[in-house]
């Protein structure tokens, strides 16, 4: 039978045999010469991974530092490779790219890069006569899908080997960018754990401990974020660093290497439906071209594979869709194995899947991808250029301009502008006022609106128009209800801004400038200092005030003073509360205002023009919260990580992470706020545990229950959440025979679509907010949430209950919702507060910090922590 070979190492591959008409797999050790035309030895100095590491790839897992050592060795010893460090992880591990091409191409790498950007219109000037294909291979975004980095070393070696004439011919017209470890922190978490668990000999029994990685596992990064959901949101330092250099290159082909379940055959493109409708016919076509080339090699070796199932091209935060929306041929490749497989595991068929098997498959598709990019260089480059020229001349989505009104005193629009800048999406403002007509994101209808200097204006006629259209589509365009992830995400909803989409082309050529912070005062010796409460930036500033040991109050009601109106939640710092700072209070606040870009206004008196005076009982002292957050089983690691990141990176406020299993022995009186991330609490919050928590709340504690934690409290004694009674049809018990047959005689093949009818994979709903309640401070009377799942509860009905955010009927704004799911969410609670004794329970039915990108969710969390209960 045909076989692949490579001088990388001796790898155990699956070979296919036919015996007694039964197809089975057997392992065999064969010498690999993959995509090579000769058996010449590598140039002096360059070692194979096996020679350098001292073991064959597949015999053990390689730690990140050792992967880096090998990549650096290759760069030192091959004229085909340059190395670029592009960042550091939260745990200070290096992030690197290996640039692979011919020595001649590497000598003019900057020219090649700029020529490629000229194809997109992102760089001015004439393109050279022979543009190169640019292929970017990304490995190990999920740390415990650990075969990827092993395969990356194999692929790097074969491309770097100057005696390999076949790969050398591909590199004549191609630059390959290899990111060997996207998620070093997660990889080392898994590899170090596995190396501790495995014995002298691997144990292929699936019950063995080496196949039972404990939570949180190595899939995610330091803060337990899934980096393969973050490409567009840029919440994590690894993503921020990677996208910065990605946008400097804009590759024609991008591959994201993954693993899936142990028993799954290999998956490669073409992808499954739904495809977003902005994806071009060429992008679909070339996926198939590459897939057919993979199939040729897999067929020769008898390796099982599948295409066009499971992995769609819709949600924009993936390593296949984000590149696709940026003009690339973006693809995911999935090898069976993942965190369960280890060095080898017995599959359901009785065959053993080895790490060497997994390496060979990823190595094959990586090389096959480079081959196709080289073979089709001219067409690939031409279609890439066409993608961007079409984006500029005829942007997708049906709109020519997006307008976001500058928020008065807040910084949400500035935060959105900063996000767009990082994505490479151009925006500006206007110099003169005008009017236009368009779609209002707030009211979901066509309206007339004004455009004024300072408003953010985004011209859709730009190179990144496709990505812009996907991120700003008012209503998601989805062709199939069976999708892999959330189905709505539009940034105007996430940032909760006043936004419009119009078919009129409006030039926003003037530079958009951020508001300037600082301290101003109407007196040399102010009576008090006032800070508006509108935005996440204000939460971060409050955290800094606490860190500076400055006492602060919050206005429960709106008031006016010295000609300015201030809304509920406004922060007030009085001289009387801070006598220990003496005359330095002003200078300290001025320094903080400059550092954080916050507007601080000093007033000469506490006597207001309207509302409650600054010494009123309606101006409440904010106790500096001491916060405990549960983590570890049975708490969701992602929910915990989102909170951890919120405190650590977004508002810079100290928090104590507490092992969930120690809740029973925890002295809750040491804390004023206890946060229960989403999770399953049955094992740790038994009757005695709940009684302990309720006693602490009655004594003045503030309990915050997020998603699964809120669901757990439904129906529990003393808690206000109840189950939602489903509406019943009057004739439900009087079904005809035909109706009974339709209900009970279901088709097995339709089971996935039946589940979709009752599902909410992730959709945007409009909510009504009581912004007079501290949990609603800083919001308008309505806002938007991203709802996932049908976990819903009816409005609370007790005298001590406050339904602060609610979903009314017909509140869907964008996204896929099964037709039977609507009745589950109509007239339900989004978030609310139960008063219990001297304390409060904050119920957050959905996680406002989901993936860290729902900007207004941070405001909600800040209110729950700092405003509620004062």
Image (cartoon, rainbow, N blue to C red):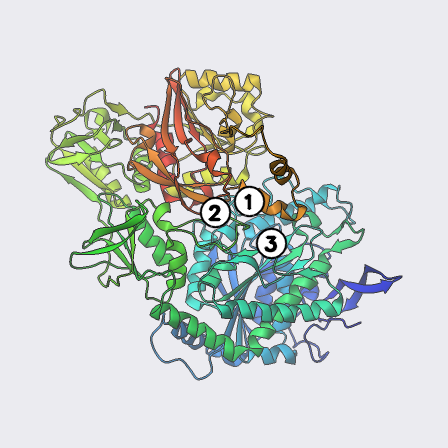
- 682 or 722: nearer the eye? 722
Residue 154 visible in the picture: no
Q: Quadrant of residue 669?
A: top left
Q: CA distance from mark 2 to mark 1?
A: 9 Å
Q: Looking at the image, tell me whether mark 3 or mark 2 is earlier in sequence order.
A: 3
Mark 2 or mark 1, earlier in chain: 1
Mark identifier at residue 198: none
Above or below for 857 versus 279: above
Inter-mark Cα distance, 1 to 3? 14 Å
Any mark on residue 756, and which? 1
Quadrant where the image shows the C terminus: top left
Q: Earlier in the sequence, mark 1 or mark 3?
A: 3
Q: Nearer the viewer, residue 742 or 858?
A: 742
Q: Position of residue 715 (x, y in %)?
A: 51, 21
Residue at (38% x, 30% y) in the render: 864
Q: Are marks 2 and 1 in contact (CB under 8 Å)?
A: yes
Report which residue position mark 2 lands on.
Answer: 816
In the image, 198: left or right of 392?
A: right
Q: Residue at x 78, y 53 (%)?
A: 352
């Amino acid at each position: 039978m045909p076989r692949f070979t490579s001088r990388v190492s001796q790898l155990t591959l699956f070979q296919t045999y036919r015996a007694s008409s039964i197809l089975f797999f057997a392992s065999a050790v064969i010498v690999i010469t993959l995509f090579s035309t000769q058996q010449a030895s590598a140039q002096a100095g360059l070692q194979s991974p096996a020679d350098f590491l001292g073991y064959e790839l597949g015999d053990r897992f390689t730690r990140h530092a050792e992967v880096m050592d090998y990549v650096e060795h290759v760069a030192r010893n091959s004229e085909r490779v340059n190395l670029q460090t592009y960042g550091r992880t939260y745990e200070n591990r290096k992030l690197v790219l290996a640039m692979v091409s011919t020595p001649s191409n590497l000598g003019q790498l900057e020219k090649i890069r700029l020529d490629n950007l000229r194809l997109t219109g992102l760089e001015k000037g004439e393109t050279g006569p022979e543009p190169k294909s640019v292929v970017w291979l990304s490995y190990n975004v999920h740390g415990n899908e650990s075969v990827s980095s092993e395969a990356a070393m194999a692929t790097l070696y074969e491309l770097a080997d100057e005696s390999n004439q076949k790969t050398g011919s591909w590199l004549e017209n191609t630059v390959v960018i290899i990111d060997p470890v996207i998620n070093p922190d997660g990889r080392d978490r898994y590899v170090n754990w596995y190396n501790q668990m495995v014995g002298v000999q691997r144990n292929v029994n699936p019950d063995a401990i080496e196949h039972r990685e404990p939570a949180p596992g190595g899939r995610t990064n330091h803060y337990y974020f899934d980096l393969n959901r973050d490409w567009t949101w840029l919440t994590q330092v690894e993503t921020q660093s990677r996208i910065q250099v990605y946008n400097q290159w804009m590759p024609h082909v991008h591959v994201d290497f993954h693993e899936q379940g142990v028993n799954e055959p290999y998956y490669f493109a073409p992808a499954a439906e739904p495809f977003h409708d902005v994806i071009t016919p060429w992008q679909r076509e070339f996926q198939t071209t590459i897939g057919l080339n993979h199939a040729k090699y897999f067929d020769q070796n008898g390796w099982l594979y599948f295409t066009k199932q499971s992995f769609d091209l819709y949600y924009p935060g993936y390593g296949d869709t984000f590149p696709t929306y940026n003009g690339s041929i973006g693809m995911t490749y999935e090898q069976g194995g993942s965190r369960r497989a280890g060095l080898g595991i017995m599959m359901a068929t009785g065959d053993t899947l080895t790490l060497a098997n997994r390496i060979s498959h990823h190595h094959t598709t990586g090389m096959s991808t480079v081959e196709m990019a080289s073979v089709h260089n001219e067409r690939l480059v031409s279609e890439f250029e066409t993608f961007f020229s079409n984006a500029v001349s005829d942007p997708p989505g049906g709109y020519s301009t997006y307008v976001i009104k500058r928020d008065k005193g807040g910084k949400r629009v500035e935060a959105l502008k900063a996000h767009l800048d990082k994505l490479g999406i151009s925006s500006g403002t206007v110099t003169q006022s005008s009017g236009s007509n368009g779609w209002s994101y707030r009211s979901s209808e066509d309206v007339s609106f004004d455009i004024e200097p300072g408003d953010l204006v985004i011209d859709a006629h730009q190179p990144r128009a496709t990505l812009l259209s996907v991120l700003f589509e008012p209503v998601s365009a989805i062709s199939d209800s069976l999708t892999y992830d959330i189905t709505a995400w539009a940034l105007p909803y996430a940032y909760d801004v006043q936004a419009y989409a119009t078919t009129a082309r409006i030039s926003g050529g003037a530079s958009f400038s951020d508001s300037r912070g600082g301290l101003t005062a109407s007196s040399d010796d102010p009576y008090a200092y006032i800070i508006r409460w509108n935005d996440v930036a204000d939460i971060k500033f409050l955290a800094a005030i606490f860190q500076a040991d400055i006492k602060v109050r919050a206005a429960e009601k709106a008031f006016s003073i010295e000609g300015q109106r201030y809304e509920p939640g406004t922060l007030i710092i009085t001289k009387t509360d801070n006598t220990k700072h003496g005359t330095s209070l002003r200078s300290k606040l001025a320094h903080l205002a400059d550092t954080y870009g916050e507007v601080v206004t000093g007033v000469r008196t506490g006597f207001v023009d309207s509302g409650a005076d600054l010494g009123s009982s309606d101006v409440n002292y904010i106790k500096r919260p001491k916060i405990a957050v549960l983590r570890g089983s049975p708490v969701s690691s992602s929910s915990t990580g989102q909170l951890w990141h919120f405190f650590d990176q977004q508002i810079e406020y100290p928090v104590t992470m507490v092992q969930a299993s120690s809740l029973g022995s925890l002295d809750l009186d040491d804390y004023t706020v206890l946060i229960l991330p989403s999770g399953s609490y049955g094992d740790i919050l038994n009757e005695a545990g709940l009684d302990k928590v309720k006693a602490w709340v009655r004594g003045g504690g503030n309990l915050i229950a997020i998603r699964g934690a809120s669901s757990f409290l439904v129906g529990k004694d003393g808690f206000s959440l109840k189950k939602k009674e489903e509406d019943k049809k009057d004739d439900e018990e009087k079904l005809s025979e035909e109706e009974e047959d339709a209900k009970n005689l279901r088709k097995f093949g339709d089971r996935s679509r039946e589940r979709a009818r009752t599902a909410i994979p992730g959709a945007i709903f409009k909510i009504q907010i009581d912004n007079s309640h501290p949990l609603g401070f800083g919001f308008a009377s309505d806002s938007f949430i991203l709802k996932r799942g049908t976990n819903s509860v009816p409005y609370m009905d007790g005298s001590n209950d406050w339904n602060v955010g609610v979903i009314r009927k017909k509140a869907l704004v964008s996204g896929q919702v099964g037709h039977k799911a609507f009745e589950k969410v109509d007239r339900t609670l989004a978030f609310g507060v139960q008063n219990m004794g001297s304390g409060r329970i904050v119920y957050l039915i959905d996680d406002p910090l989901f993936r860290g990108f729902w900007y207004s969710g941070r405001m909600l969390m800040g209110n729950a922590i700092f405003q509620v209960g004062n």
